[in-house]
Amino acid sequence: SQSSTLVIRGLAVGELKVSDWKRIAVRELGQGFVLGAILAAVGMARVWMWGDGLPFMLVVGATLVAIVLLGCVVGAMLPLAIRRVGFDPATSSTPFIASLVDVLGIVVYFSIAKLALQFSCAHPDLTTTVAGSTNPANIRQWAKWLAEPLDGDLLREVQAIFAPVKNLGHAEGLPENN
């Protein structure tokens, strides 16, 4: 959103023209990469501290860099595109850009995670903790289990076992909510 605000201001005061898009895109790519790398380092450090493994660290790091890059470029290019088609670039409001980048961020994350899972399944000789297992055969088995129907009797038995357990950290576990 800061990128779009600066571009909209530049267009309004005449400092920028739509034809400056290449220069603006290069600037935003550089800034997005640097900011993304900083955030990726923080995110990867968190993954490392909680012991989630190198593959998950790489997924988190790549996702953060990609999302920040995407946010910077989309934020800067959208006002230029809107001006190019003849509309007021101020209509590319911050909530719209934030929502667009959020949706794209989800797509980016799941795309990178999918690639990591496909890689770990295709290379059974590599140890991975991407899906919480070091065995690709386990990942395949879990995927098969997801397609199977639930055993209703077993589910009721498990629910009966856990019925007396109350989690006081969640609203449904508090006595006044039961």
Image: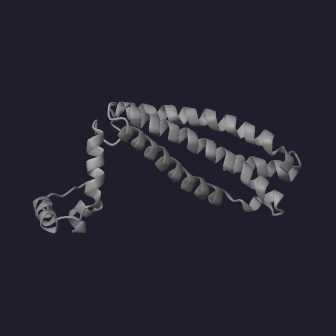
Q: State left or right for residue 93 relative to residue 157.
A: right
Q: Can residue 17 be seen in this view?
A: no
In this rendering, the answer to whether 142 lies above or below 66 is below
Q: State left or right for residue 137 relative to residue 8.
A: left
Please name whichever residue, 15 or 135, is drawn nearer the observer in this view of the structure.
135
| Percent x, y of residue 120 | 37, 38
Please name whichever residue, 93 or 124, is drawn nearer the observer in this view of the structure.
124
Q: State left or right for residue 80 relative to residue 109.
A: right
Q: Which residue is drawn at 89% across and 49% down?
A: 14
Q: State left or right for residue 78 relative to residue 95.
A: right
Q: How many marks?
A: 0
Q: Which quadrant of the figure has residue 26?
A: top right
In this rendering, the answer to whether 58 lies above or below 143 is above
Q: Residue at x 21, y 64 (%)?
A: 150
Q: Residue at x 69, y 59 (%)?
A: 93
| Percent x, y of residue 164 | 12, 61
| Percent x, y of residue 33 | 62, 35
Q: Residue at x 51, y 35 (%)?
A: 40
| Percent x, y of residue 37 | 56, 33
In this rendering, the answer to whether 139 lies above or below 153 is above
How was the colour assigned to the protein in this rendering? Answer: one colour
Q: Is residue 173 visible?
A: yes
| Quadrant holding the C terminus | bottom left
